[in-house]
Image (cartoon, rainbow, N blue to C red):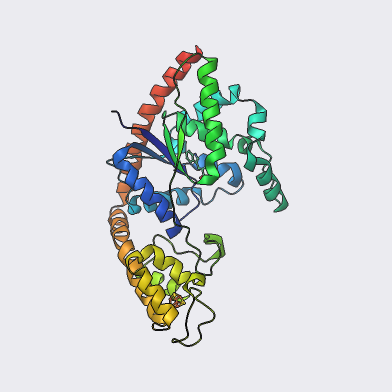
Amino acid sequence: MAKGRIFSGMRPTGRLHIGHLSVLENWVKMQDEYECFYGVVDWHALTTAFDDTSQIKDNIREMLIDWLSAGIDPEKSAVLVQSHVKEHAELHLLFSMITPLSWLERVPTYKDQVQQLGQEGKDISTYGFLGYPLLQAADILVYKADTVPVGEDQLPHLELCREIARRFNFMYDTKLFPEPKAKLAKVAMLPGIDGRKMSKSYHNDIAISASPQEVQEKIRMMVTDPARVRKDDPGHPEVCVVYAYQQIYNAADVENCADCCRGGTIGCVACKKNLAAKMNEVLEPVRERRARLEANPGLLDEIVIAGVKRARQEAAKTMEEVREAMKI
Ligand code: TRP
Ligand code: SF4
């Protein structure tokens, strides 16, 4: 049986944190089972950040390096930048002809976001932002991808994508587009080091690219059980950020870790040291791949050029079929 095809993308928001690492680990796993296209969707970033584009090129590079260091393999997957594959824009334009405005206006997140950003003083009642999910549908359908690994927040966008595919197929009497399914993965929800949601803007994140020393330092700053004053005070691991990380990075020993904490037989300093050692072990191969990329500055460009070429081949083929179906 032919392999299924995947498209997924991320907006270039700058360096990724370890929360994203579990998303990328899923992408990495899928490389053998599916034919994968992974795109940095820079036009999507422009739907909100159109007024300050100063960081976008750097952000694209950083994101690509994070992906490749996490194990995305350009021999297996096409790694591309959305704006380098102009077919995304052509398909978006053609979809915009057949999409009722009401479909876009009723996407659950749309009005909320316009309002929320409006309160923050930013006007995104633009044509481009309204069309965000349509551009996303074009990203997916230009490769005729049937499977889309995304988070739960993206389900309404995927629903719209299927509706567009169905409408196009019906309107032009064709079977050209599949109706792509979301593939939800269990991703570990790691809190930031202060216990809030992990976010670069809160300065409570750990970057995928963090050095061993940075990892140690961030873990040293993690909030623990406030009831533990002395190291033999009994602790409550369930309220401790360090413990949330132990569950992911030290899964084999996590029961023991909880027992020691509750029994007051390990101090937080020692517990944090254990965690740092485990996390650094996991991040080591990621660092090695990053070092290899950084030692060869031309390599990233080569990888993107090859990925874009492969992507364009597929996208151009789809667009020919689209024009034929539409008789244009
Ligand atoms: N909207 C997605 C997000 O914010 C990013 C995205 C754009 C995407 N195009 C896509 C994801 C196509 C999957 C497939 O996460
Ligand atoms: Fe958290 Fe570990 Fe301290 Fe318990 S011993 S409170 S799990 S850091």
* Above or below: residue 172 compared with residue 216: above
x, y (%) of residue 87? Answer: 46, 28
Q: Quadrant of residue 252?
A: bottom left
Q: Determine whether, in the image, residue 221 is placed left or right of residue 110.
A: left
* Above or below: residue 256 compared with residue 309: below
x, y (%) of residue 183? Answer: 44, 41
Q: How many marks?
A: 0
The answer, for residue 21, to whether it is visible in the render is: yes
Q: Nearer the viewer, residue 267 or 223?
A: 267
Toward the top, the furthest residue is 327
Q: Nearer the viewer, residue 99 or 311?
A: 99
Q: Quadrant of the N terminus?
A: top left
Q: Quadrant of residue 255?
A: bottom left
* Above or below: residue 145 compared with residue 229: above
For the point 48% across and 79% down, the residue is 235
Q: Nearer the viewer, residue 65 or 294?
A: 65
For the point 40% across and 76% down, the residue is 259
The answer, for residue 213, to whether it is visible in the render is: no
For the point 37% across and 27% down, the residue is 314
x, y (%) of residue 127? Answer: 65, 34
x, y (%) of residue 82? Answer: 45, 38
